[in-house]
């Protein structure tokens, strides 16, 4: 049996290891489109801040980890998949085609540049790969002017390392006028914005970006911003071009079923590239989260190896360190139709808790500045625990969440 995995992120590496465990006689090939060993993309901000070196970003400690498991590792780029009714071949940018009996697509996503001219000028960079990190590091330093175009989760992850370098950071939120809009209520976003501004970050929430000029310089309809570095952090798209012609169904990602199978026989998908089941809604969405990718890879590999393992769905959960202010969002944090919501806010101390209920079950939450109840929130949502009398108490006093969790866990 020939197993081929395209993509050496958390989903691909976990899948390769799981296949080795459950199909030890099979031939397993793991393909990375980037040079070097598999690394964790979420480690890049820590490299920029100097907290770790590039070696610390490796997914596995040992240099020969994959080789010791008999996994064939290739630094090549997949350019096309030739799918048949019972297997197929992967065409690479160099070397012979790789035959497969079962194929896993775990290629993740790539940055989507903003739709303006000049995104390719020197000094305009994404913060996505190790090579990006190396180029950014050469332009960072005390007093350097950094303009970040975009204010979503990817931007939020990078901010701390940029500010830690001593750079002067300006963040352009764009037309929405709200930072972290996809993971935060307007109230929470305003609180995080105040926190950033109190630490010297300029947050620009009005005006439209027109172009990036040499310098680099960001030209807006209201002003121009000279910089030593422009970070492009305006979104991502799934890496799926090599699947053209296979018949794989695409929406916001590669569509999969509960066993991680695509619409093409013998082809599975996992991680940021896959449109998988959402735990909270049962809908099929892309969750660009490392824990989700890792679990996707494990479940996909089990099914590729002949097991019958259904995926129950991933909980949407984001954790963000915004210059030292920690925030979490869980599940249906926007609330549900007909459901109740409780909020408690301490503006002076940058504390915020939002709990969302469906009947007497907790289905979503946001916390800013609170670390203790994180495990309790996740546990109550994922177990779909009925709160009973605790619901009314939590509506009145959301800060009692840990007490509720402990009490309910002892029953």
Image (tube, rainbow, N blue to C red):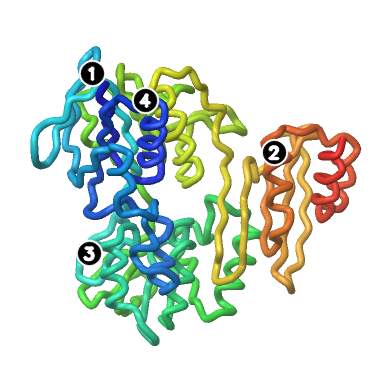
For residue 16, the mark is none
Looking at the figure, which quarter contains the C terminus? top right
For residue 23, the mark is 4
Q: Earlier in the sequence, mark 1 or mark 4?
A: 4
Q: Earlier in the sequence, mark 4 or mark 2?
A: 4
Q: Residue at x 29, y 23 (%)?
A: 102
Instruction: Please identify, in this view, whether the residue under mark 1 or under mark 4 is nearer the observer.
Output: 4
Q: Gap between marks 4 and 2, in whole Å?
A: 34 Å
Contact, CB < 8 Å: mark 3 with mark 4? no
Q: Residue at x 36, y 25 (%)?
A: 23
Instruction: Please identify, in this view, whether the residue under mark 3 or under mark 4 is nearer the observer.
Output: 4
Q: Secondary structure at mark 3?
A: loop
Instruction: Please identify, in this view, whether the residue under mark 2 or under mark 3 is nearer the observer.
Output: 2
Q: Secondary structure at mark 1?
A: strand
Q: Gap between marks 1 and 4, in whole Å?
A: 17 Å
Residue designated by label 1: 87
Q: Earlier in the sequence, mark 3 or mark 1?
A: 1
Q: Position of residue 384 (x, y in %)?
A: 72, 32
Residue designated by label 2: 381
Q: Secondary structure at mark 4?
A: loop
Residue designated by label 3: 118
**Viewer-closest of 301 and 226:** 301
Label 3 Cα neighbours within 10 Å, binned few <14 / some 14-19 / many ≥20: some
**Viewer-closest of 292 and 192:** 292
Q: Earlier in the sequence, mark 1 or mark 2?
A: 1
Q: Residue at x 36, y 69 (%)?
A: 53
Label 4 Cα neighbours within 10 Å, binned few <14 / some 14-19 / many ≥20: some
């Amino acid at each position: 049996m020939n197993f081929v995995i395209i993509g050496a992120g958390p989903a691909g590496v976990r899948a390769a290891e799981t296949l080795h465990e459950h199909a030890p006689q099979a031939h397993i090939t793991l393909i990375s489109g980037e040079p070097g060993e598999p690394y964790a993309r979420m480690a890049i901000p820590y490299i920029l801040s100097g907290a770790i070196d590039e070696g610390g970003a490796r997914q596995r400690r040992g240099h020969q980890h994959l080789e010791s498991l008999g996994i064939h590792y290739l630094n090549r780029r997949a350019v096309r998949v030739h799918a048949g009714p019972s297997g197929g071949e992967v065409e690479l940018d160099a070397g012979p085609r790789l035959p497969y009996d079962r194929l896993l697509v775990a290629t993740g996503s790539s940055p989507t540049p903003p739709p303006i001219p000049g995104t390719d000028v020197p000094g305009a960079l994404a913060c996505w790969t190790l090579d990006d990190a190396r180029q950014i590091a050469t332009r960072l330093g005390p007093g350097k002017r950094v303009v970040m175009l975009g204010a979503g989760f990817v931007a939020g992850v990078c901010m701390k390392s940029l500010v830690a370098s001593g750079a002067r950071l300006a963040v352009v939120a764009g037309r929405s006028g709200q930072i972290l809009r996809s993971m935060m209520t307007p109230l929470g976003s305003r609180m995080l914005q105040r926190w950033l501004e109190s630490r010297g970050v300029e947050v620009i929430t009005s005006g439209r970006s027109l172009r990036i000029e040499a310098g680099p310089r960001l030209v807006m309809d209201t002003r121009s911003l000279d910089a030593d570095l422009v970070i492009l952090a305006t979104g991502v798209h799934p890496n799926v071009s090599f699947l053209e012609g296979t018949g794989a169904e695409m929406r916001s990602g590669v569509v999969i079923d509960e066993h991680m199978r695509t619409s093409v026989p013998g082809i599975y998908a996992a991680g940021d590239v896959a449109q998988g089941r959402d735990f909270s809604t049962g809908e099929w969405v892309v969750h660009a989260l490392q824990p989700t990718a890792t679990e996707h890879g494990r479940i996909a590999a089990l099914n590729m190896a002949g097991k019958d393992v259904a995926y129950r769905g991933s909980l949407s959960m984001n954790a963000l360190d915004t210059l030292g202010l920690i925030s979490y969002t869980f599940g249906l944090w926007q609330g549900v139709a007909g459901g109740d919501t409780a909020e408690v806010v301490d503006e002076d101390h940058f504390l915020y808790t939002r709990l969302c209920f469906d009947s007497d079950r907790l289905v979503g939450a946001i916390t800013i500045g609170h670390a203790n109840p994180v495990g309790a929130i996740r546990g109550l949502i994922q177990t779909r625990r009925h709160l009973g009398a605790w619901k009314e108490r939590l509506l009145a006093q959301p800060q009692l969440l840990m007490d509720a969790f402990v009490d309910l866990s002892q029953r």
